[in-house]
Amino acid sequence: MKQCLVSDPILKPLNPNKDLVLSTDGSVYGLGFYALQQDDMDGMLHAVKYSAFSTTPHQANYSADDLELTALMPALKSVQQLALLRHVTVITDNSHVLHVNDWKASNATQKRMIAYIMQFNMSLIYIRGSRNLFADALSRLFQDTTIQERVEHQAKYMHSADDFVLPVTTRSVSRATLNTTTLQTAETQRTPSGTIAQSPSLDVPQRHTASESDIVFNERQSRFARLWLDMIIAQSDAHNFDADRSMLNSNADTETATQLTTPDA
């Protein structure tokens, strides 16, 4: 059975000289898609690739629009090398994805997904959900599976820290190295002679070290505080300048009035 599902005529070999047709569907259980190409013999569309991935616990809380948009990510990534060079037709049963060019992103994940989609020469076609049977069946493949099986069938690239589209963790290798170096430097102290000596170890409970997100947040807070302080100083200087100018004008008016009221000797 497995051999039949992955061989001709059920699954045709991928032709790099032909355009692609992708049909996708997303549910709270999983993300399903299949890729089609037109056959030269009968002119029909035949499957050249199909797959399904289980959703993460975080993705299971997505809205229907976000799930449908997320389902398009593994479909494009699976044929990315060819899709960047050929025209791609996407079949979806979500009207919001149909107008992805006008999608107003409401969070960073949507911005990354839309930015990734924009690099493809792609057109979208809407069909009713009742007719998108194959992709819908693939997206619900993990409905009755165990938690361990769902974890094993999650998309591997979503666990890559350097992935641009759907990273589970946003810490890159370079930032993690930089953070480690910073924490190690903080644990050392420089002597007057210029040599670096390790701080003595004490048998006390270790304090909670700040994560990279905390450090970045604190840097942003400090930058915002400096900008706010500069603005207050600028406003204060402008206010003092206006006050000095008003005082000078008042003194000048007083002197003029005094000269007018003083009789000539």
Image (cartoon, rainbow, N blue to C red):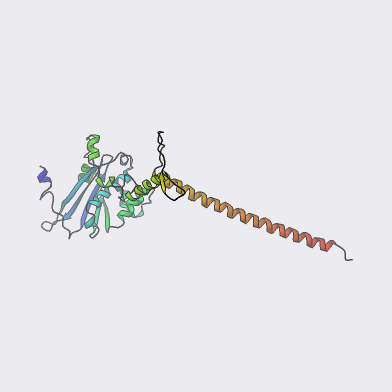
> Of all residues shown, which one is farthest toward the front?
193
At 24% from the left edge and 50% from the top edge, which residue is drawn?
Answer: 75
For this rendering, which residue is in front, 172 or 132?
A: 172
Q: Residue at x 71, y 57 (%)?
A: 247
Residue nearest the viewer, comparing 264 with 19 = 264
Query: Foreground: 113 or 187?
Result: 187
Asked where in the image residue 260 lies, by quadrant, the reply is bottom right
The picture quadrant where one finds residue 263 is bottom right
Image coordinates of residue 90 in percent, x first then y, are 25, 53
Percent x, y of residue 186: 42, 45
Pick whichever, 144 or 38, lies toward us. Answer: 144
Question: Which quarter of the rendered picture does the N terminus lie within?
Answer: top left
Q: In the visual, does 8 lie left or right of 238?
A: left
Count of numbered tags:
0
Residue drawn at the location 75% of the way across and 59% of the way down: 251
Who's the residue at 31% across and 54% down the image?
116
Residue 109 seen in the figure: no
- Toward the bottom, the furthest residue is 265
> In the rendered image of this protein, does residue 248 appear above or below residue 178?
below
Asked whether the viewer can see residue 246, the reply is yes
Q: Position of residue 122 (x, y in %)?
A: 27, 57
Residue 189: image location, x then y, percent = 43, 45
Image quadrant in which the C terminus is located: bottom right
